[in-house]
Amino acid sequence: MTDSTIAQDTEAQTSSEPAHIAPGPKQVGAIVVGNALEFYDFLTFSFFAVQIGATFFPSQNPTSSLLAALATFGAGFLTRPLGAFVIGRMGDKHGRKPAMLLTFGLMGMAIIGLALTPSYAQIGILAPILVILFRLIQGFALGGEVGPSTAFLLEAAPPHRRGFYVSFQLMSQGIAVLASGLAGLTLSHALSPQDLTDWGWRIAFLIGALIVPFGLILRRSLSETLHLEEPAAATSAPPPKTLPVRVIVLSIAIMGAATICNYIVTYMSTYAQSVLKMPSTIAFGATVTHGLTMALFAMLGGVLADRFGPRRIMIAPLVVLAVIAAPAFHVLEQTRTAAALYSVVALLGMLQSTAVAACYLGVTGALPKRSRAAALAIIYAIAVSVFGGSAQFIVAWLTDLTQNPLAPAYYLTGVIVVGVAAMLGMPMQRRLIGVR
């Protein structure tokens, strides 16, 4: 079956879908709060990598502790494909709602477990083993979260506002980054560096755990979008049984590039501490800046994708990002001031978030409804596991190997070149996503 046939079948299915369910603030809030907490949990580990490394992977070489912590952060990506397959198929078979309830419950268990795991000094080798176990649970849950939640947002949205609604997926991640950064900034100001390493970072995880009951209540109130009755015209032509290899490969490349861009900007707080030797009080401010710009410009990316189609909004900001990455890192390395750090993070975050929101829409909208949750979850999980999970480790390793603080910028530029090539080759139709 050709790409054009797939696109036509999917377009016919999407354009003839029944009236949307007009999600209200409570419905959208259930997705945003749940998704934000899951990413808050997952990303907080990265933001406190320096402190977690010292707690569970003590070493006389601080770089070795940091790399061990980042490798453990990457371990959470190993189970993402498994979670995507299991929970994504559940979302396509039994509904988006039960799948999202399961992912949220698992993430709640993992965040509490991480917060309460004793240090290496207290229980020895069992400590890093438990940390890795909870990271694997986190990865399994988050791997199954993105597909059903993004499918819900697309299916619940009015046809001409699908980009805006799908952007809530990335916007909720921005809220997670913002909340984690605020927690880190507050704790780093209130505690001494030693107290932050000894126990302060655990408070950030426990703050997230407090939201778990609230999030479960909200998600139990969700409507179901999978089993909305469809007109006979939509069901007369059966959807394709499989997606073309070209679509799968290009989707993975697009989501991989988007994820690497996101995680490199997310890594800036750790980069500021470990490479630029800036104090944690300033470094965590970079996380706050990134979270704020990510939340705001993700929605802008969704609105622009509705207006102009996703392909243009994917590519244009990333081309600009590739051009300015190295100069921005050079200025930051030369000045090493809070103003420079926040300005660079804001600039990179604005461009990256605008583009990535369109990537979510472009890839999700190209998938048939009856396999959308599983297909998106698996594509996203593979992309994130292979590329996103290794991004922070690779840039830390490259920086240490080359002793060049611009190494993250060069890696980012190379990734964007590959990602833009995939975006140019991806078959997309504007009517497929409801653009008038």
Image: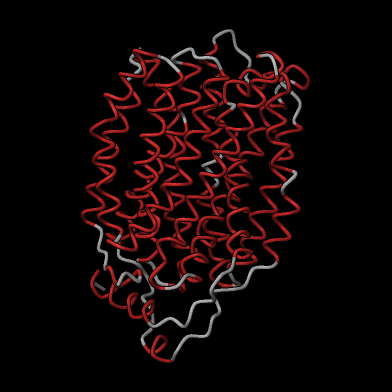
Left or right of 127, for residue 240: left
Work out whether residue 339 or residue 26 is closer to the camera in this orientation and state it: 339
Left or right of 248, for residue 83: right
Point out the residue furthest to the top here: 60
- Figure quadrant of the N terminus: bottom left
Measuring from the top left, give residue 113's x and y in whole percent: 73, 38
Left or right of 164, for residue 92: right
In the depicted structure, whether residue 103 falls above or below residue 368: above
In the depicted structure, whether residue 307 falls above or below residue 105: below
- Figure quadrant of the C terminus: bottom left
Q: Residue at x 38, y 79 (%)?
A: 13
Left or right of 120, for residue 241: left
Work out whether residue 268 or residue 248 is closer to the camera in this orientation and state it: 268
Measuring from the top left, give residue 77's x and y in whole percent: 52, 42
Point out the residue furthest to the front here: 339
Q: Residue 28 is drawn in which quadrant? A: bottom right
Q: Residue 241 is drawn in which quadrant? A: bottom left
Q: Residue at x 27, y 56 (%)?
A: 311
Q: How many marks?
A: 0
Image color mode: secondary structure
Q: Residue 262 is drawn in which quadrant? A: top left
In the depicted structure, whether residue 78 falls above or below residue 281: below
